[in-house]
Image: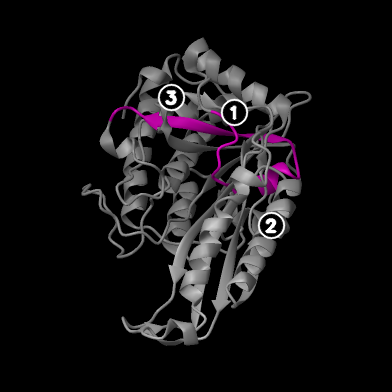
Amino acid sequence: MTDFWLTTMAAAQTLRRDLHAHPEPGWQEVRTAETVRNTLDKLAIPWRKCAGTGTIATLQPATPRDGAKHIALRGDIDALPIVEQTGKAWSSTKSGCMHACGHDGHTATLLASAQWLKHNEQSLSGPVTLLFQPAEEGGHGAREMINEGAIDDIDEIYGWHNWPAIPFGKLVCPDDIIMCGNGTFSITVTGKGGHASQPELCRDPVLAASAITLALQQIVSRRLAPQQAAVISITSFMADSGPTIIPQQAVLGGSIRVPDDATREQINALITDVSQQTAHSYGVECQVEITPRYNPTINHAAQAQHVRQLWQASYGVDSIDLNTRTPIMASEDFSYYLREIPGAFALIGANDGDAHHQVPCHSPHYDFNDNLIPLVSTLFSRLCGVTTPEKPAQQTI
C-alpha cells in the first residue's frame, strides 16, 4: 500500500512540473487538457469533455454503501499572463505565461487522487466525479462547467487552494464565508487638453483623476462601517501624453472585494457617485463602468466541519489554522458551485520556509509546494471513504 502511494505521489510531482513548464491561459488549456485526458486513459478512468478544455471523470464502486453521497472534487487548470522569474529547472517555456497561482499543483493533486481512488475503487463509499476546470482566473470556468451539467447529479463538492501566507499543512475552512466576491471598474475622465504652459485654458483630466483616486480610497475608511470587510483598489492610471501636453483624457482601472451582495451594491453606487461628483468639481466629465465578477465563496457548515475533522484526524488537533482571519479578500469561482450544491472550499498552507513557497500567488517568483500533493490527496481520498497510509504528513516527495 505504502509503496504504491509513494510511487503515485512521485509521479504527480513529475507531472506537476511538466504542467508548470507548459502553462496555458484560460480557455486555451489545450495541452493541459490533453495531458489530463491521457493520464485518465492510462488509469482506465472514463471521462468526457465539458466547457471546451474542461474534463469530467467518474469513478464508481460496484456496490455503493447505503446512503453514500455522490462526491465531486475540483481542480483548476489555467495559468496567468505573468513572466516567470523563479529560475527553477521546470520554469515556464511559454513567454509571458506562468502557473503563478498553483493550478498546476491543484491539477496534479487531483490526478494523484484519481490514481489512488482508481486503485481502491471498490472501497469508495459512493460515486466520485473529478472536475478538471478551465478558466478560473476571471474566465468564469465554473459557471460554464455548471451550464454544461457538471454537477447535475452531485450531492457535495470540495475544492482547495494552496496559500503561501499560511504555515505549511495548516488548514483554513470556516463554516461560512472563506473568500470575498470581486468586481472591476473603469473610470474615464474627459477634460480639455492643451499646452502645459497654459493650464488655465485647459480642464486637466490628470489632476481630476488623481483627486478621484484619493477620494475612492476613502470610501472604505469613511463611508463603510469598520466591521465591513471590503477593499477598493485603483490598479491602473493611464493618461498618455507628452511632457508639454495636458491630455484630453485619463482612464482609471480598479478592483473591489466584497463579502456580500449588499456591500457590493453599496460600494458600486459610491464609486459612481464619488467619481462623478469629484469630476464635476474639477470641471471635467466622468464615465464609470462597473463589471461584477465572482460572488463570495461561502462554505456550507456541515461540509466544512467534515473537512476539518478529516484534516485533524490525519494531521493532528493543531493542524487547523486559527490565526488567519476570514474572509480572505481574494476571490474564487468555486463560489459558483457552492451557490448550487452543498460543499466546502479550504485554504491550505504552503509556507515551509522555502523562499518560493512564501511569496504570494500571482508573483513571478511563486512556485507551488509539491509536498502539498500527498496531504491533499489524503484529504480527497478520505472524503470519498478511501484510506491512505497512516502518516502522510510525514511524507515528502
Q: Quadrant of the C terminus?
A: top left
Q: Residue at horizontal 48%, vertical 57%? A: 33
How many labels sit on residues?
Answer: 3
The amino acid type found where label 3 is placed reads Gly
Q: Nearer the viewer, residue 64 or 208?
A: 208
Residue 5 on image: x %, y %: 40, 26
Q: Nearer the viewer, residue 357 or 307?
A: 357
**Label 1: which residue?**
173
Inspect this view and state whether residue 137 appears. no
Colour scheme employed for the rendering of this structure: one colour
Amino acid type indicated by mark 2: Leu
Question: Is 334 a magenta residue?
Answer: yes
Residue that label 3 marks: 169
Q: Which numbered disc, 3 or 2, marks the residue closer to the eye?
A: 2
- Which image quarter is the N terminus in? top left
Distance CA(mark 3)–CA(mark 1): 13 Å
Figure check: 181 above or below 96: above
Q: Nearer the viewer, residue 198 or 173?
A: 198
Of the two numbered discs 3 and 2 on the same chain, state the one appearing first in sequence: 3
Q: What is the x, y in percent for residue 282?
A: 57, 73
CA neighbours of label 2 inside 10 A, class few (<14), some (14 to 19), many (20+): some
Q: Which residues are magenta?
A: 325-353
Q: Which residue corresponds to mark 2? A: 270
Q: Which residue does the image show at 27% across and 32% down from the upper left?
A: 354
How many other residues sit within 10 Å of disc 1, few (<14), some (14-19) or many (≥20)? many
